[in-house]
Amino acid sequence: MKVLANLKYTKEHEWVKVDGNVATIGITDYAQGELGDIVFIELPEIGFEVKQMGKFGTIEAVKAVSDMYSPLSGKIVEINAALDGDPMIVNKDPYGDGWMVRLQVTNPSELGKLLDAAAYESLLKEH
């Protein structure tokens, strides 16, 4: 199970990487492993505005359907269209090609409420 040091994490197992005022968001390696084979992903429209920890989509796997929550507030500026044709990209590469959405960050101070890699690894040890 991979946890990358350069990302921030939520307790709900999403990750975020901020580059300037744009955040790339996906689900963690742990989350995709728990879900199993992902069969469908519902993502928001470009322009959708989401608050920190607000729902931005759902992910459906053979075992379960789960909501996905945004680590930061902002407006969706890009969705990963490749996931429409092959949602299992998330199983293969959750931190790379399996990203979900990019959003324009409206409140950068919210990053301080997220977990760093060490805190996220501690959370995983409790599972």
Image (tube, helix red, strand yellow):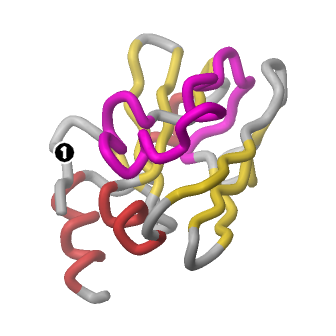
Residue drawn at (65%, 67%) of the image: 66
Q: Is residue 86 magenta?
A: yes
Could you say which quadrant of the image residue 16 lies in? top left
Name the residue that disc number 1 marks. Answer: 4
In what quadrant of the picture does the C terminus appear? bottom left
Residue drawn at (57%, 71%) of the image: 62
Residue drawn at (64%, 24%) of the image: 79
Could you say which quadrant of the image residue 72 lies in? top right
Which residue is outermost to the bottom?
A: 126
Few, some or many residues within 10 Å of mark 1 (<14, 14–19, 20+): some
**Left or right of 11 on screen, residue 119:** left
Please name whichever residue, 116 or 109, is drawn nearer the observer in this view of the structure. 116
Q: How many marks?
A: 1
Image: 85 above or below 93: above
Residue drawn at (20%, 82%) of the image: 125
Relative image position of residue 35 (x, y in whole percent): 47, 70
Relative image position of residue 111 (x, y in whole percent): 45, 40
Image: 69 above or below 35: above
**Left or right of 127 on screen, residue 16:** right
Relative image position of residue 117 (x, y in whole percent): 21, 54
Please name whichever residue, 96 or 69, is drawn nearer the observer in this view of the structure. 96
Q: Amino acid at mark 1?
A: Leu
What is the span of residues highlighted in magenta in the rendered image?
Answer: 71-98
In what quadrant of the picture does the N terminus appear? bottom left
